[in-house]
Image (cartoon, rainbow, N blue to C red):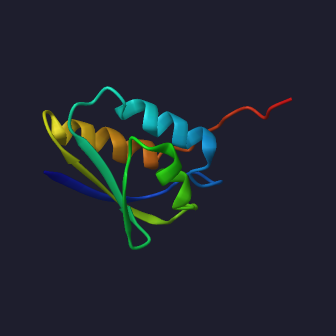
Amino acid sequence: MKRISTSVKNERGIHARPSAVIVQSVQEYAGTTRLSAKGQEIDLKNIMELLSLGLFQDDLVEVIVSGTEEGKVCQDLAALFETHFDFPPRE
């Protein structure tokens, strides 16, 4: 099992669109992917659980991964939480 602590960098936090990117990135991963934040631990393959955390910029999170290539997957997920997502506004 690998764990990496990081913080949310996106100005608007982890809302629906960044959540979709994060969850989609692990859907095919055979191992387990979890996130610990705000006193809760959730399954990162479940978008509703991720959204329910209400993560804002600078919130601390811990990414937890078990399985093959867990180090790489853990680092990739941590990088997504550190991403400044720049989605164009919807018209």
In the displayed structure, would residue 31 be above or below residue 56?
Answer: above
Q: Is residue 64 above or below residue 16?
A: below
Residue at left offset 62%, top offset 43%:
16
Q: Residue at the spot x=80%, y=32% of the render? A: 90
Left or right: where does residue 77 sit relative to residue 13? Answer: left
Q: Pinpoint residue 68: horizontal percent, then vertical percent.
A: 13, 33
- 81 relative position to 84: left or right: left
Drawn side of residue 43 relative to residue 4, left or right: right
Q: Quadrant of residue 60?
A: bottom left
> Splitting the image into 4 quarters, where does residue 73 fall?
top left
Observer-nearest residue: 12 or 54? 54
Residue situated in front as seen by the camera: 33 or 18: 33
Say left or right for 57 vs 80. right
Q: How many marks?
A: 0
Residue 65 lies, in percent from the top left, at 22, 47
Judging depth in this view, the residue of 28 and 84 nearest the camera is: 28
Taking the view exactly as shown, the residue that stands out farthest to the bottom is 39
Asked where in the image residue 5 lies, by quadrant, the reply is: bottom left
Which x, y percent locates residue 91?
A: 86, 29
Is residue 35 shown above or below 60? above
Judge by depth and name the residue closer to the eye, 13 or 54: 54
Question: Compared with residue 91, is residue 75 higher up or lower down, i.e. above or below?
Answer: below
Residue at (65%, 54%) from the top-left corner?
12
Q: Residue furthest top?
A: 28
Residue at 44 percent across and 44 percent down: it is 46
